[in-house]
Amino acid sequence: MSLDIQQLERFLIKKSENVNIQNIYKIALPLLKSEVSKSFNLERRPSDGVAWKKSKVALRKKRKTLHDSGTLELGMQDNSNYIIQGNEIKELSSTDYGAKHNFGYDINDPNDLSSFGLEYRQFAGISKDGITELIKAFEVSL
């Protein structure tokens, strides 16, 4: 998942500020981390709000899905999982299974669209409310 800077282009043009990706990263990073936490807490995709399918383990143990050890969610709070590439901020996962859950397939093999037995449970990205919050953060910071 990535935050496309074009989503904010109109706002930045209206502000007529000379903003670079480094400034955007500093403002957006806390919000992106918060959006990931919301995804895990609500068990929903940030992009469209669709609920994740409950895992068999979560049903059996009467707990939330993707909350076994906490490694995946906690790992997404590490700054090293958010990098700048061109004009985008990329959200990465430090675990193989994280990428497989988030994208539903092996992103390293474009021919493999299977889920490896893992359900598609997107957790990285930004919601419509998150975009609104991000624009408000820019208004205050710029």
Image (spheres, rainbow, N blue to C red):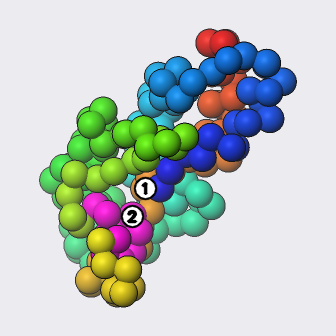
124 horizontally vs 134: left or right = left
At numbered mark 2, what does the secondary structure look like: helix, strand or loop?
helix
Numbered tag placed on residue 112 in the rendering: none
Q: Which amino acid type corresponds to the residue marked 1 in the rendered image?
A: Phe
Is 110 or 35 nearer to us in this picture? Answer: 110
Query: What residue span does the magenta drawing correspond to?
Result: 98-107
76 horizontally vs 125: left or right = left
Q: Position of residue 27 (x, y in %)?
A: 52, 23
**Outermost residue, top direction?**
141
117 horizontally vs 128: left or right = left
Which residue lies at the image location 40% right of the left edge and 47% below the top edge?
91
Main SS class of the magenta portion in the image? helix
Per the image, is 59 magenta? no
At numbered mark 1, what does the secondary structure look like: helix, strand or loop?
loop
Question: Based on the displayed image, in which of its 4 quarters is residue 83 positioned?
Answer: top left
Total numbered circles: 2
Residue on which the image places disc 1: 123
Q: Position of residue 86 (x, y in %)?
A: 49, 42
Q: Is residue 78 visible?
A: yes
Q: Is residue 41 visible?
A: no
**Outermost residue, left direction?**
69
Is 50 or 11 nearer to us in this picture? Answer: 11
Numbered tag placed on residue 102 in the rendering: 2
Is 107 or 126 nearer to us in this picture? Answer: 107
Q: Position of residue 94 (x, y in %)?
A: 22, 51
Q: Which amino acid type corresponds to the residue marked 2 in the rendered image?
A: Asn
